[in-house]
Amino acid sequence: MEGEHTSVAFRANHEVMDGKGVVIWATDVFRALRGEEPHGAPDPVSVSDIFEDVTGAEDFSLTFDHLPALGSCEPTHRSRTVSGRRSVQGTFPGLVARLAVLLRGVTGTEPGVFYIPVDLRPRRPGVASTANLASGFSLEVAPGETWPTVHERVLRLLEGDAALGKSLSADVLDTPLAELDEAIATMDGKIRERGRYPANAVLSHAGRIDPADLHTPGFTAHTAYLTTRPEPGAPPVLDLVEVGGRTEITLSWWDGPETAERIEALLDEVAEGLSPAALRHWPGNDTATESTDDAGIVERFLRQAAETPDAIAIDSPGDRLTYAELARRTAVVAAALRDLGAGPDTVVGVLGDRSVSATVAVWGVLRSGAAYLPMDAHNPDARIAGLLRDAGAPVCLVQRPHHERDCVPDGCTAVVIEDLDFTAEPAFQDVEIRDEHLAYVIYTSGSTGQPKGVQIEHGALRTYLDWAIRDFGIDAGTRLPLLASVGFDVAGTTFFPPLLAGGTIVLRPAEISHAMLHELLTGSGANTLSLTPSHLALINRLGIRATGFRAVILAGEQLHTSVARQAQDLFGPDCRIINGYGPTETTITMTLHLFDKETDTGSVVPIGVPTDNTTMFLLDATGRFVPEGEPGEVYIGGAQLARGYRGRPDLDRERFVRLADGTRVYRSGDIARLLPSGEFEFLDRTDDQVKVLGHRIEPAEIAKALETHPAVGSAVVVPRTAGEHKALCAYVIPIAEVTAGELTEHLGGLLPKYMVPAATVFVDDIPHTMNGKVDVRRLPDPFRRGDQPVAAGDRDELTESVAAIWAEVLGLNPDQIAGTADFYALGGNSVLFISMLASVSDEIVGDAGQERFTAALSRIVPEPTLSRVAESAREAKDLPSAGKDAETIV
């Protein structure tokens, strides 16, 4: 039983223990090693005891059909054995029947005869024993038979007690051991001389083993297999075990001049028959590429700063930093962190907005040798404190607007970024940073209710940057804005590639709004974008025509072809629309597809093929490779894989697994298929996880947060259709008086805003399907509108116009939108909210009143009702500018 660097072996004599007994013994040993109570195996039951329960069982007597043993040859050594093993990806229903059909063709005998051992423990329910409780039967396979036919016959034989048809006679049991050993040795010698055996082979299936049962602190088993020494007078045994999504097959035989070669050739035929090479090896995974630069990312940045010290590294209103200034500021941060004990594999929090301070902090942490933990400043204090505690961060760099918040827990030192002396020349010596050191930790939603920290190492990030700079066309002329939250891994596409290529990061401190996007795309000089498809759709709706853009890089969500086509029209034919895919656990993105209006004719844009040094596999529910065109779960391998989850070895065992060939992969939960073009297309999820504005959300985490409220007995959260969009809906069984507003406020103190459900519905019961999943069809839909209008019949023309805009954005009937209706409760989100406000500003308020309307956002944001928006538009319409500074959407 193998760990990554260690093997653990259990050895047992077949006279006292069978294969199932070894598994029972081994799992109990690991329970004891984990400090758990062993189950034990105290029952003294024997095979004879079980046969006594069966009436009409005949005595067992040896019969010889004089068959050649599978893979046999004249042995040259009477005690030394040779073994072979194959790990085959996936598990196979009817495995014994499949192998019997495969092997009959190899032996050439007509029919093939195979002995099938059977575990008799089910005959004594509840028996706890490691004894040899196996019996069996012979199975004949005729030429031309298919495995389903043979499997059906095996099932009938088992139902008919075929394994209990013969018992050892009393004469054998009463024979003195010395005489019995002599008789067996004589029989074995004659059988070996003739090379003729009772069967071609023994097919011994030990069942299924869960690798999770074979772990202790510091040891994780990736596989387990059995190897049986040949028995006197018996043919070879093929030991079969299903473990960790693979099938382990071993074969041993007496040593001879060609034994090893024959065993290897036989196992090759078996492996190919079960899992053809055409499915295992896909040319698209031939991505191995040598890096042209072995320097780490910090070294590359410092080298660029030395080469172009006066070039603009960060362009932000009122704070443009050259490469030399950025290098000096990051050295100040790094020196301060080193003084506080930060270094390799230390985690340092970074709390800030899309700002110069946050960018300097990220690079300063990297220069110190530590890993940064980016946190969105819009997260509630409790959430931020929880992430810092879970990550074990001893220091948190805080941007000044947030330094008075109660979000840094005890034991973590808060350092206000702006309070550092950036005028000083720090005496800082850069430390050695190796590929295996942590670069960053980013938290994603967790299905257990606990966010999980994904740990990305420098080597994985360097691999991403090697190809991203090349394939995105990043160079010294690149000007790339930061649109993603600093707590979103896609922000790495802005933080790193431009500064390693001599380009510029463009920063706008304001939150995303229609005015900010217009200025960014038409007046900032930006020429490359990195954003989610949702934000690209927003730009499309705003109709902003940007010129001079080289590339629009998309990731985080599924890209619909209609969005890509409209964007191509807006940005022009010379702008490349690049679609990427990659979970946080695989370092930002790891596939690419260049959108083509002529060939991309499906409803969604393909996600492309793996990039340099990454691989992608599609497996079905049994863990087998799927043929082209068939849907399968995405398993990702290669140099961009995360180290694992911070402090969660249980999740590591579940999500970071090994394929049969030993390849370490991340099990994504995404479903995709391989198109005839040789590219992948994303289809769906295997679980309830959803995406909101590129953020992964586990609805179970929201439900767990709801259940911390004393008035909530239980809750579930599901995505539902709201107009043309998806929105989260919470279903709550209350145990005390509580309002939906109170629960929304409760969640707002625990979770990011994008995780707070748009609607909360109180129910008496939460229905489930027969397989235990929530039956969404039987739950009330808060977004379904009846036929009766809910709008007041006497609302004025302006309110009707605002309602029409809401209806268009949300995909609803305007007559079904009441004046008190909340935009988010109707299924809206922040991107749609921006789109709605932009339309109201352009179509109703007009140019003269836009600044006044923007200034009213501080009243609209906390009360996003139809009446409030209409009232604000009425006050601003056709009025001169109030001269106030425009406020932004929070």
Image (spheres, rainbow, N blue to C red):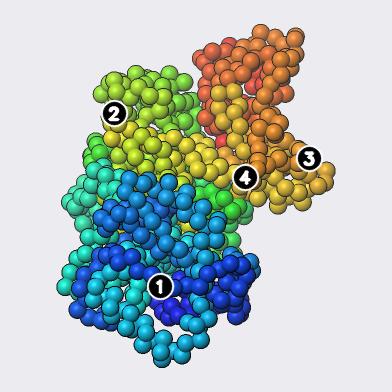
User: Compared to 664, does 630 lie above or below?
Assistant: above
Q: Position of residue 333 (x, y in %)?
A: 39, 58
Residue at (42% x, 50% y) in the render: 150
Of labels 2 and 3, earlier in sequence is: 2
Query: Residue 884, located in which quarter of the rendered image?
Result: top right
Viewer-closest of 187 and 609: 187
Disc nearer the start of the sequence (4/1): 1
Tag in front: 1 or 3 = 1
**How much space separates mark 1 and mark 3, taking CA atoms?**
67 Å
What residue did someone put label 1 on?
A: 62
Alpha-carbon span between mark 4 and mark 1: 48 Å
**Front in this rendered view, residue 858 or 60:** 60
Farthest-out residue, right = 737
Q: Nearer the viewer, mark 4 or mark 2?
A: 4
- The residue to which callout 3 is attached is 764
Total label count? 4
